[in-house]
Every structure is written in structure tokens, then in C-alpha cells.
Image (cartoon, rainbow, N blue to C red):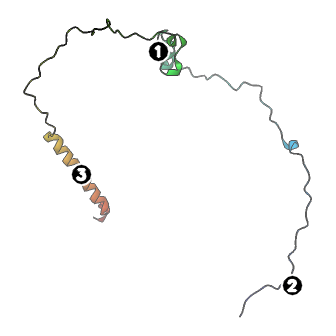
């Protein structure tokens, strides 16, 4: 039993408590002074021709893009009235019914060129999948 153990007769020393100075928190606050120059300076770049065209070509009766941009004059307008016709009768006097042709051709949903292209795409997809699963072209 050859263990290296420190003797127990030494007592751990403790640091004497130091007095912390009492400082009011408001005395540490320092306010920065703001500069007297205005932070909003105009850029020296002139606006693009598209922004100029967008601002200048707005007609008075144009409808705005969003629902919250609608001016009050559009909200106060009366909605359009749908014509209903006289009471008790239909709007159209005659109902026109046309005969359908007896020889209706069924559209060919399976076009040969589209089918060939889909088969080729699926072949290439599966080929890439198998090559990737086997480790790619690094084996060669």
C-alpha cells in the first residue's frame, strides 16, 4: 500500500472577508451626449428612373394595390347593381340548345413521345440511384 496521501494536520486557510464599498447604482450611469448634427442626411445619389416613373404616373382614379390602401372615396361609392330584369320573368326570352356531334373522338392520353421520354427519365433516375448506392464511379 504505497499511496501518496497528504497529511491531515494542515487546516485550509480562508481569506479574510473584504469590505465591498457601497456604491449607489445611479452614480455609475453616464448619459451620452447626442450630436447636434442631424442624422438624416440626403443621399447624393439621384433616384432611379423607375422610381421617378412610378411616382409621377399615378392617375387620380387608379385603384390601389392593397385593401388597406383604398382611399375613402372608393369606399363611399355604391356597389354596382346587377340587372335582374322584370319581376316574374327570365332575362332571356329564348333558350338556345345546340346538338352535340355523335362522333366524339377520345383524346389520346398516351402519346408515344411522352411515354418514351418518361421511360427514359425513370431509367436515368434508377441508374443514378444504383450508382450512388454502390459508391459511385470511384471504384473504377
- At label 3, counting other C-alpha atoms closer than 10 Å, the crowd grade (few under 14, some 14-19, many 20 or more) is few
Circle 1 residue: 63
Residue at the outermost front position: 88
Residue at the image point whose x is 10% and y is 28% from the top: 104
Task: Give the x, y percent position of residue 28.
Answer: 85, 44
Circle 2 residue: 9
Observer-nearest of 137 and 1: 1
Circle 3 residue: 124
Secondary-structure class at tag 2: loop
Residue at the outermost top position: 86
Task: Give the x, y percent position of residue 102.
Answer: 7, 26
Task: Give the x, y percent position of residue 75.
Answer: 51, 13
Mark 3 vs 1, N-terminal side: 1
- In the image: residue 139, left or right of residue 38: left
Mark 1 vs 2, N-terminal side: 2
Corner quadrant of residue 114: top left
In the rendered image, the vertical position of residue 115 relative to residue 33, given as above or below: below
- At label 1, counting other C-alpha atoms closer than 10 Å, the crowd grade (few under 14, some 14-19, many 20 or more) is few
Quadrant showing the N terminus? bottom right
Amino acid at each position: 500500500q504505497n499511496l501518496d496521501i497528504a497529511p491531515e494536520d494542515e487546516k485550509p486557510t480562508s481569506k479574510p472577508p473584504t469590505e465591498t464599498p457601497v456604491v449607489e447604482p445611479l452614480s455609475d450611469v453616464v448619459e451620452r451626449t447626442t450630436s447636434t448634427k442631424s442624422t438624416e442626411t440626403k443621399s447624393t445619389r439621384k433616384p432611379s428612373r423607375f422610381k421617378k416613373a412610378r411616382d409621377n404616373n399615378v392617375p387620380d382614379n387608379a385603384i390601389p394595390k392593397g385593401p388597406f390602401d383604398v382611399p375613402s372615396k372608393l369606399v363611399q361609392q355604391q356597389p354596382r347593381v346587377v340587372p335582374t330584369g322584370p319581376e316574374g320573368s327570365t332575362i332571356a326570352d329564348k333558350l338556345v340548345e345546340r346538338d352535340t356531334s355523335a362522333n366524339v373522338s377520345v383524346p389520346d392520353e398516351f402519346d408515344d413521345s411522352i411515354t418514351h421520354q418518361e421511360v427514359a427519365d425513370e431509367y436515368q433516375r434508377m441508374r443514378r440511384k444504383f450508382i450512388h448506392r454502390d459508391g459511385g464511379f470511384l471504384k473504377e
